[in-house]
């Protein structure tokens, strides 16, 4: 048993943390927020140079990590800085590409040359109707894809899109150029910063990744890795929420004493601290199970997403409440951490969905 | 990071399992599994079996009879014994008094008392709480006045668990009233057979009497029964409480109880379907299971830190709070699973050899008594509110 990150990973965490605090302060983040792509390409290049993207992939695929705790370590630092960029899409699309042996594409992701995103969930239209899964047709040697995907992260900045679509034998994955004929992108900023977009494809030329009809396992693996990443990111965001709130409680005075001296508030923060430790354990469990059999893997991933979802809401709402009026302001970095925390609950399923999934998987295992 | 146990640890687990298979009497594990009351003889029998193997006091230093196990091995032992429905080791002598004696006692005290704890010569109980000193333990009033080579003790202790079985009691007593209330407390070892001691049982809401009041009237205690220095007892008491709290997390017991709950939820039905498939019940069970899985890792993290030489301090308060909440939630779900059969109150059904007609599903007999009994978990060992005070002061530095 060993709960240390290990020397190499600790070095990566330290250098990533240093890089982000030197190059991604609050005002830099503010600029990225209003940029067209929702993130800074300079920072992305810097991170690639630092080897951060390579840490997400295995040596076989040209990276130097790719393990669950590598992913956790990187996303923890992303959370600590609430860094903006196509991290999750790179991880999830990259997992699919890695499984299919697409090392050339991975290499260009690792170098920062190509930016990828992951488009899986269908779009929902104004009437609340969900689009059908994307469909495919054979076009000579290649394929074309048609369909609509919703809230695709960092779509505007992506060079290529990893798209899931139905083929005869089942789900397949394709790489689609964002600039290809038949691709329409409508992008928008997100509540917690960064950007996403609605993707419409009409007979868009697509390159098959892996075998036709056999992508379900790779997609499930990508989702599990994404859940591990978000769980570690969430715990780091909670750590910041907790630390900022405690600082504030020690300095803010009302009724002549620091508000941290009030027992009602102390007990609430003790509960928050306890729940965060449980969430940290959940994130560790999910990472430890990422390479186990799918039912165990997905159960631990859902347990973690449920836990960080539930605890994240507690940590964010308590942080805002205990900061009082000042916590409501855009000016205070804390409010942006709170927004990120809550919005993680909307990525890859919220706590209720994951509790349901945990139950269903348990019945499957029994 | 690596959450796997080493091959050595797994081999150790097999050793523990083999021992339990061979040595744990089915009579005892059946009683534990079915929620029956254990007698003093039952507890002594299990202690003797463990002591024979040298496994009664894993956390003691080896020279006093400890096992020299790693924290991971201790965790494995706790989980395996609980999953096998072993009786719980009575903590008062082994886990509360002994660590204090080992750290603060004189050589003569260690030589005299420690072997007697192991071989069962002495049964200890804890004299901490008083009618006016619960969470605010330091305001205790039981007084010890030095007269020659004796202390004369007067006062009252309460909530003394299994005091009816004990022949000795370790007590916090006031030896000085002049300064801060924490500064005038001493730690005394008292023979219950001394004239002037009276034990009165307190019947609890589950109908059972596992706790007592202990009255002291001019009780003469030899001065060599003072542990450490006079008026330094508060330091020893706090040390003891930290020990008590890591034991209180009870992850192994929760794991065993959850397995039972899962079985019950497969068998019991509501609206024609097993409870395990009832959306409301399944959701509560799933939340509980997730919390328990998280708790296991939190506990291992605390043990890992302790193994790295960091003392478990305030983190044990987190284990205490969540560990007791989980055990209470399991007992709540067991009670709810029994439905209307949670109501019958048949005391004899909880005794060994009950031959009466069973009422309702077999698991239902102890569930309500246990539910009510387990309300104590968030109250004793420092209430969960006191634990929040400790977290707030020591970890959050508020």
Image (cartoon, rainbow, N blue to C red):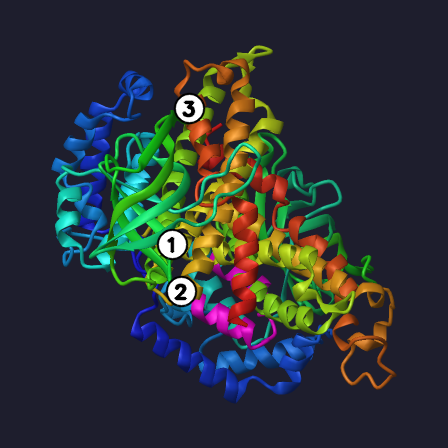
Residue drawn at point x = 78 percent, y = 85 percent: B353
> What span is colored magenta in the figure?
B75-99
Residue B134, horizontal then vertical, whole percent: 69, 43
Name the side, left or right, on which A275 lies relative to B72.
Answer: right
Q: SS for tag 1?
A: helix
| Image mark 1: chain | A
Q: SS for tag 3?
A: helix
| Nearest to the observer: residue B182 or residue B258 | B258
Q: SS for tag 2?
A: helix
Residue A336 numbered mark, or none: 3
Above-or-below relation of A245 to A8: above
Residue drawn at point x = 40 percent, y = 56 percent: A285
- Discs 2/3, front: 2
Name the side, left or right, on which B177 lies relative to B118.
Answer: right
Q: Earlier in the sequence, mark 3 or mark 1?
A: 1
Direction bottom: furthest residue:
B22
Residue at which label 1 appears: A224
Residue at which label 2 appears: A294
Q: Is residue A304 magenta?
A: no
Between the residue at mark 3 and the residue at mark 1, the CA separation in whole angstroms equals 26 Å
Between the residue at mark 2 and the residue at mark 3, the CA separation in whole angstroms equals 35 Å
Name the side, left or right, on which A112 lies relative to B249.
Answer: left
Q: Are marks 2 and 3 on the same chain?
A: yes
Residue A335, horizontal then vertical, whole percent: 45, 22
Q: Is residue B76 magenta?
A: yes
């Amino acid at each position: 048993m060993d709960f240390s990150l290990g020397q190499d990973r600790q070095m990566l965490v330290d250098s990533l943390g240093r890089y982000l605090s030197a190059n991604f302060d609050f005002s830099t983040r503010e600029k990225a927020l209003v940029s067209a792509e929702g993130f800074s390409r300079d920072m992305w290049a810097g991170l690639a140079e630092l080897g951060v993207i390579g840490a997400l992939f295995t040596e076989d695929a040209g990276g130097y990590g790719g393990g669950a705790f590598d992913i956790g370590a990187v996303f923890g630092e992303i959370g600590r800085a609430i860094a903006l960029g196509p991290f999750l899409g790179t991880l999830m699309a990259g997992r699919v590409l890695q499984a299919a042996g697409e090392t050339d594409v991975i290499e260009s992701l690792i170098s920062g040359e190509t930016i990828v995103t992951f488009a899986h969930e269908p779009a929902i239209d104004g009437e609340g109707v969900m689009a059908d899964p994307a469909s495919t047709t054979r076009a000579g040697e290649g394929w074309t894809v048609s369909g609509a995907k919703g809230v695709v992260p960092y779509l505007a900045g992506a060079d290529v899109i990893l798209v899931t679509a139905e083929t005869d034998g089942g789900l397949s994955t394709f790489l689609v150029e964002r600039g290809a004929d038949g691709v329409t992108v409508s992008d928008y900023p997100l509540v917690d910063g960064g950007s996403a977009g609605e993707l419409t494809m009409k007979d868009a030329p697509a390159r098959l990744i892996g075998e036709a009809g056999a992508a379900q396992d790779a997609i499930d693996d990508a989702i599990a890795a994404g859940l591990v990443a978000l769980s570690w990111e969430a715990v780091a965001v909670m750590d910041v929420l907790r630390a900022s709130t405690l600082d504030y409680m020690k300095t803010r005075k009302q009724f002549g004493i620091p508000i941290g001296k009030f027992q009602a508030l102390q007990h609430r923060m003790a509960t928050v601290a306890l729940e965060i430790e449980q969430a940290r354990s959940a994130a560790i469990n999910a990472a430890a199970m990422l390479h186990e059999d799918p039912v165990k893997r997905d159960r631990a991933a859902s347990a973690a997403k449920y836990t960080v979802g539930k605890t994240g809401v507690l940590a964010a709402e308590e942080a805002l409440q205990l900061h009082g009026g000042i916590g409501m302001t855009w000016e205070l970095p804390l409010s942006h951490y709170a927004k990120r925390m809550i919005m993680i609950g909307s990525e890859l399923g919220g706590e209720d969905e994951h509790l349901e999934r945990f139950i269903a998987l348990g019945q499957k295992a029994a | 990071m690596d959450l796997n146990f080493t091959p050595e640890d797994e081999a150790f687990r097999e050793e523990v399992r083999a021992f339990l298979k061979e040595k744990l009497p089915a009579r005892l594990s059946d009683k534990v599994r079915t929620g029956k009351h254990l007698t003093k003889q039952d507890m002594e029998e299990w202690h003797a079996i463990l002591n024979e193997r040298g496994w009664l006091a894993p956390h003691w230093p080896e020279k006093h009879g400890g096992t020299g196990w790693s924290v991971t091995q201790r965790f494995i032992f706790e989980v395996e014994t609980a999953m096998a429905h072993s009786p719980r080791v009575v903590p008062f002598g082994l886990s509360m008094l002994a660590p204090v004696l080992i750290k603060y006692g004189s050589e003569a005290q260690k030589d005299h008392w420690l072997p007697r704890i192991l071989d069962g010569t002495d049964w200890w109980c804890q004299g901490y709480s008083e009618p006016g000193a619960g969470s605010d333990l330091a305001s205790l009033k039981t007084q010890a006045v030095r007269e020659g080579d004796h202390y004369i003790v007067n006062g009252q202790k309460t909530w003394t668990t299994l005091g009816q079985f004990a022949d000795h009691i370790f007590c916090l007593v006031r030896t000085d009233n002049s300064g801060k209330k924490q500064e005038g407390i001493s730690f005394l070892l008292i023979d219950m057979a001394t004239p002037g001691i009276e034990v009165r049982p307190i019947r609890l809401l589950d109908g059972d009497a596992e706790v007592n009041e202990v009255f002291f009237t001019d009780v003469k205690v030899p001065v060599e029964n003072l542990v450490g220095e006079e008026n330094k007892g508060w330091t020893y008491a706090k040390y003891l409480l930290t020990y008590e709290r890591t034991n209180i997390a009870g992850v192994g017991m929760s794991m065993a109880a959850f397995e039972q709950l899962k079985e019950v939820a497969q068998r019991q039905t509501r609206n024609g379907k097993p409870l395990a498939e009832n959306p409301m019940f399944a959701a509560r069970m799933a939340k509980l299971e997730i919390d328990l899985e998280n708790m296991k890792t939190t506990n291992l993290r605390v043990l890992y830190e302790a193994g790295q030489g960091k003392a478990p301090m305030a983190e044990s308060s987190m284990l205490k709070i969540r560990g007791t909440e989980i055990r209470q939630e399991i007992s709540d779900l067991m009670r709810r699973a029994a439905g209307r059969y949670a109501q019958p109150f048949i005391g004899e059904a909880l005794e060994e050899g009950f031959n009466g007609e069973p009422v309702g599903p077999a698991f239902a007999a102890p569930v309500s008594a246990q539910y009510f009994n387990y309300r104590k978990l968030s109250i004793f060992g420092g209430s969960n509110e006191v634990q929040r005070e400790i977290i707030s002061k020591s970890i959050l530095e508020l």
